[in-house]
Image: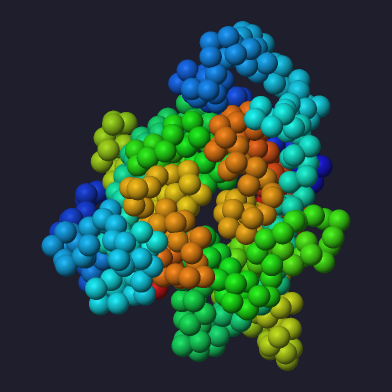
Amino acid sequence: MFAFAGKKLIQLIVTTIGVVTLVFFTLRLIPGDAASAMAGDTLSGEALERLRDQMGLNEPLMSQYLTYWRKLLVLDFGETITTGLSAGELMRAAAPITISIALATIVVTVLLAIPLGTLAAFLAHKGKKGLDSLITGAAMVLDLMPSFWTGLFFLLFFSLTLGLFPASGTVSLENPGHFLQRIALPVMVLSVTQVATMARITRTAVLEVLSEDYIRTARSLGWSELRVLFRHALKNAALPIVTVVGLSFGSLLNGTVIVEFIFNIPGIGSLLVNGINSRDYQMVQNLIIVYALIFVTINFVTDLVYRKIDPRVSF
Amino acid sequence: MSMTGSAVLFSPAHPFPRVRGKFMQFLSNQKTQIGLLILVPILVLVVLAPYLPLQKPLQTNLRAMMQWPSWTFPFGTDRMGRDVLSRTLEGVKVSLLVGFSVAFISLAFGVVLGTIAGFFGRFVDRAIMTVVDILLAFPSLLLAIGLVSIVGTGIFPVIVAIAFADVPRFVRLQRSLVLGLRTRAFIDAARTMRASKTWLLFRHIVPNTIAPLLVAASIAAANAILVEASLSFLGLGIMPPEPSLGNIIRDGQTYLEQAWWISTLPGAVILAIAISLHFLSDGIRESLDPRART
């Protein structure tokens, strides 16, 4: 386990270096340079030159790159050019909101999707085709619903018509009750897609296991269907399910950008969209890196859990 | 569906499928038919749109602002009195263009790079896969968002951005397919008969990866349509007044309470297209890959 984790950790570090390098150099491909793209037509020659100096764009490329690393390692993200606020502080305020939404979605998803998928597999196994195809059909449609569309529906129905959840207002962890009310709809919207994906995978995985010999043995011992299903079948079907939880985290992060936009949530997704609209390339660069790091870290954890469940796994 | 038909496709002696027979098999598949049943009417409407008694997509009509869906305006009108259905059909055109271009571009690059990585191995494989792994570290929509911030807005930049985010997935798929085929018995057999590398590659390996690649490509098209809509919805993709399903929905968001139809109906069309492409991909899989049949 130790050697395995070490190997995966090295991979994580290599990927991180790659991600930072790639983002850094891609951003230097902007026609003109970041400073003139940012300023548009608003700055004259001299002011533009000062902005370049301020952004360090007049240094040689390699030294810019090394400076960027030096700052990144101490989590110094500089200042946003447009407002002059500390980019690091903005991100530190925004990140917990996005991460809470993502984690809450995972919890809701696991609680709903695993029983639903197991149920569908059980029905399919028992030959109850109608109910099974109803669940799988619904899962397919829900899976493909664009999250901004679902989001608008939920906004219209739960917030504007029923008035159950506030659609605007501050979002701060200092007021937990209000915070939960504000993130409830985003979490519901994201859960729709996630539950659908995971229920489908769970169904396939459990269905495969249900025709194994050891399940028949368990049944022949007179154990209840529920016990066989959840203690034996589900446990053995856990591997693909864990993989999917890890992989779907990517689509979950994609989704947070959209729901933050719809529900006016000041998470890192909103920072990103605002950053692009105000052409704050340094902010965009940092945020894309942060997203990638969250994603690779989750994949790293998934790999470890996978290995923990199935010691045969080696890479 | 006879077993001999599929056996011919995957046997080494006839690496090229009898295309016509395969195509008929694809058409007679039930999932294909469901997919076509959804997609074809939409396509017909898109093609016929200029000849239908609809207001032009960009034409405003101040006497018919935010009107409920009716016979004259089946999808209602927006805040400037523009016909939502005619805008939606124009948006579908853009969506399909984006979807198929992205699928085609990522398929082309994926096949070439994936085959090289899988077949030649060693250093080239390492180099390609290192880059692929780094690119896969970005959630796809976020990578597209980042790229759009560099290449700009509009149809062509959006296609480039989404395809770029998709290529690594295809490279990985193709590489694993090639690696899987390399150890198969019929490849060994061909090798013992002193088949050249080029022969092995173009006669045996690449043709056998076509079926799974087509399945992945139609899913990628559906995905690209959703990503384009998301980008345009965020205001980072295709910009108004050029209609795209995403920006029509974005437009309607402000008037959600007064005019729900502006946002919801075009969204239903996106969903329908995505569902149809998924059915078509199932149809391809079931008719081309004998092992997938259930």
Q: Residue at x 26, y 41 (%)?
A: B203
Q: Is residue A255 left or right of residue A67?
A: left
- In the displayed structure, B108 sits above or below A107; it is above
Q: Residue B160 in the image: x percent, y percent? A: 39, 37
Q: Residue A315 in the image: x percent, y percent? A: 65, 43
How many numbered tags mark residues here? Answer: 0
Q: Residue at x 74, y 32 (%)?
A: A85
- In the displayed structure, B184 sits above or below A115; it is above
Q: Residue A108 in the image: x percent, y percent? A: 70, 69
Q: Give the colour scheme shown.
A: rainbow
Q: Is residue A34 left or right of residue A311?
A: left
| The image quarter in which residue B293 lies | bottom left
| The image quarter in which residue A84 lies | top right
Q: Does residue B187 appear anywhere in the picture?
A: no
Residue situated in front as seen by the camera: A200 or A108:
A108
| The image quarter in which residue A214 lies | bottom right
Q: Residue at x 26, y 35 (%)?
A: B199
Residue ranking furthest to the front: B63
Q: Does residue A139 appear anywhere in the picture?
A: yes
Q: Residue A100 in the image: x percent, y percent? A: 75, 56
Q: Residue at x 34, y 75 (%)?
A: B69
Residue ranking furthest to the right: A174
Q: Is residue B23 left or right of residue A222?
A: left
